[in-house]
Structure formats: structure tokens, C-alpha cells
């Protein structure tokens, strides 16, 4: 089963995103804070979505990979993709990646490989959580703007 993860990282959490949601009037410092909080919320929600039906050991693996624990990464790769350095997928990933330190590169490769193996529905989880956040923002738009602009309802 092939999982396409390419589009997941293309979603932009930026001022243009806030404009599209009708929050362009926010003060610039509030926009940055709001975007940072929204990104942290998305990370939390996706993490919960990923782990909802996986054993704790699987999530511990991913956490170790995500935290760039070289021992976890090497152990996971040796157990799940022992010939990764000579695989076509690794070569393709290497050719399409910007120059990274070895640990950064291995962590990124292992996390993508882990997601493909353990959560092929990862893109759907991310998009679902993004849509939940967007719906919530739209629902609370007036309150968010009033708070940013110092107005009371």
C-alpha cells in the first residue's frame, strides 16, 4: 500500500491563511501568536489521532524517531527496513531532500517510513484535524477578532 505524504506539508499556516478565514484585521503580533498556538493544537490533535488505536509501544517508537533518538531510529530501521540504504525508496527520498545533517535525514526518512507502515491514513488524519480547526476558527471568528482588537462583545 502506497501512502502519499507529499501534500500534507504543503498546507500553509501563515497570514494569508488568516486572511482567508476573515482574520486579516488582527494585530500582527496577535496573528503570529494565534498561528503558533494553532500549529501546536494541530500537532497535539494529530498526535492523538495517530495514537488512538495503536499500541503504546508503536507510539513510543514514533516519539523516539520524532525526537531524533539515534538509537531508536537505527533499531527501528534495522528491524523494519534493514536494506534501506540500498533501497529505491531511500535513494528517491535522498535525491528529493534538501541537504540535512545525517541524523536529521535519518529521522525524517524513518518517520515517513514509520507513518507509511503504521498509519497509511496519516494524510486523512491531518486534513481532518485541519478542517476541525478551521471550522472552530470560523465559528469563533468574531470573538477572536474582538479579543485581538481589544473590543468587548
Image (cartoon, helix red, strand yellow):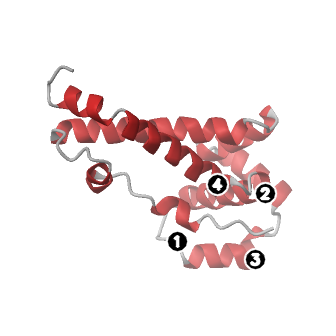
85 or 57: which is nearer to us? 57
Q: Is residue 21 above or below residue 100?
A: above
Using the numbered discs, state the Cα–Cα distance from disc 4 to disc 2 in whole angstroms: 15 Å
Cα–Cα span, label 2 and label 3? 19 Å
- N-terminal of the pair, mark 2 or mark 1, is 1
Whole-Å distance between the Cαs marked 3 and 1?
A: 16 Å
Which of discs 4 and 3 lies nearer the camera? The answer is: 4
Q: Earlier in the sequence, mark 1 or mark 4?
A: 1
- Quarter of the image that includes the N terminus: bottom right
Q: Earlier in the sequence, mark 3 or mark 1?
A: 3
Residue located at (44% from left, 44% from top):
134
CA distance for labels 2 and 1? 20 Å
Please give the residue where the numbered disc 3 appears in the rendered image.
Answer: 86
**N-term-proximal mark, 4 vs 3:** 3
**Picture residue at 65% right of the left edge, 48% below the top:** 70
Please state the horizontal and vertical placement of residue 32, each as a whole percent of the image. 26, 41
Which residue was labeled with disc 1?
A: 97
* 7 to the left or right of 58: left
> Disc 2 designates what residue?
117
- List x then y, in percent, for residue 51: 71, 37
Q: Is residue 120 left or right of residue 133?
A: right
Label 4 belongs to which residue?
124
Do the residues under discs 2 and 1 have CB atoms within 8 angstroms? no
Looking at the rendered structure, the secondary structure element under dot 4 is helix
Q: Nearer the viewer, mark 2 or mark 3?
A: 2
Gap between marks 4 and 3, in whole Å?
A: 30 Å
In front: 96, or 17? 17
Amino acid at each position: 500500500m502506497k501512502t502519499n505524504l507529499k501534500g500534507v506539508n504543503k498546507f500553509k499556516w501563515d497570514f494569508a491563511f488568516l486572511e482567508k478565514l476573515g482574520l486579516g484585521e488582527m494585530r500582527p503580533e496577535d496573528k503570529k501568536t494565534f498561528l503558533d498556538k494553532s500549529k501546536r493544537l494541530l500537532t497535539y490533535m494529530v498526535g492523538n489521532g495517530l495514537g488512538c488505536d495503536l499500541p503504546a509501544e508503536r507510539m513510543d517508537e514514533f516519539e523516539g524517531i520524532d525526537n531524533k533518538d539515534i538509537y531508536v531510529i537505527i533499531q527501528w530501521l534495522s528491524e523494519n527496513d534493514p536494506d534501506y540504504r540500498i533501497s529505491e525508496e531511500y535513494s528517491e527520498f535522498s535525491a528529493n531532500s534538501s541537504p540535512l545533517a545525517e541524523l536529521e535525514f535519518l529521522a525524517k526518512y524513518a518517520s515517513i517510513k514509520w507513518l507509511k507502515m503504521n498509519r497509511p491514513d496519516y494524510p486523512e488524519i491531518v486534513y481532518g484535524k485541519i478542517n476541525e480547526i478551521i471550522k472552530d476558527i470560523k465559528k469563533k471568528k468574531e470573538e477572536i477578532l474582538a479579543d485581538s482588537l481589544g473590543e468587548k462583545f
